[in-house]
Amino acid sequence: MRRFYKLMLSGFGTGWLPVASGTWGAAAAILMVWPLTILTPAVLNLELTLLIIAFSWIGAIGSRLLASEWGEDPSQTVIDEMVGMWIAVLGLPVSWQYWLAAFLLFRFFDIFKPLGVRRLEKIEGGWGVMLDDVMAGVYTNVLLQMVVLFI
């Protein structure tokens, strides 16, 4: 079971890349779901929601389980970036321009952790690892949904 969590938490291995593992994890998340963009928007959003729920749960449990071996929030854990990236694009129009903007904004919010995002890291039980990226994804999504609304 530990192997499963290591594979999932590392974003299918992207977390082991030597530089900018979070960026690679976010990119892997986009590459994973881009083929789903052929689906209707409603089905795509349902699929994204199911991925967000499942990977959040796996990420929280796996982070707690592997904390003694990997540490509290190790760089190889990128499942949180994957979830945050999926939240960032949830409900957005399917266009590379919006998804690229989501990628860049998400990485900004994830790296700089403004507006209380950093406080979420302090939550225990593996959820702190996940929730800061969830909030970065929410901030990204809300900002881009406002752009969509006004364009």
Image: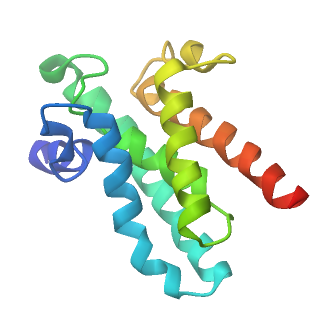
| Residue under the point 67% across and 80% down | 42
In the rendered image, the vertical position of residue 41 relative to residue 69, given as above or below = below
| Residue under the point 54% across and 87% down | 39
| Residue under the point 75% across and 45% down | 142
In-image side of 88 versus 16 (left or right): right
Q: Quadrant of residue 70?
A: top left
Dividing the image into 4 quarters, which one contains the C terminus? bottom right
In the rendered image, the vertical position of residue 52 relative to residue 127, given as above or below = below
Q: Nearer the viewer, residue 56 or 111?
A: 111
Q: Nearer the viewer, residue 72 or 30?
A: 30
In-image side of 126 versus 139 (left or right): left
In-image side of 27 versus 77 (left or right): right
In the rendered image, the vertical position of residue 67 relative to residue 130, given as above or below = above
Q: Position of residue 128 (x, y in %)?
A: 47, 23
Q: Nearer the viewer, residue 91 or 70?
A: 91
Q: Position of residue 72 (x, y in %)?
A: 29, 17
Q: Position of residue 46 (x, y in %)?
A: 60, 72
| Residue under the point 13% across and 38% down | 16
Specify how the rendered protein is coloured: rainbow
In-image side of 31 versus 68 (left or right): right
Q: Position of residue 134 (x, y in %)?
A: 55, 38
Q: Is residue 79 visible?
A: yes
Q: Is residue 58 visible?
A: no
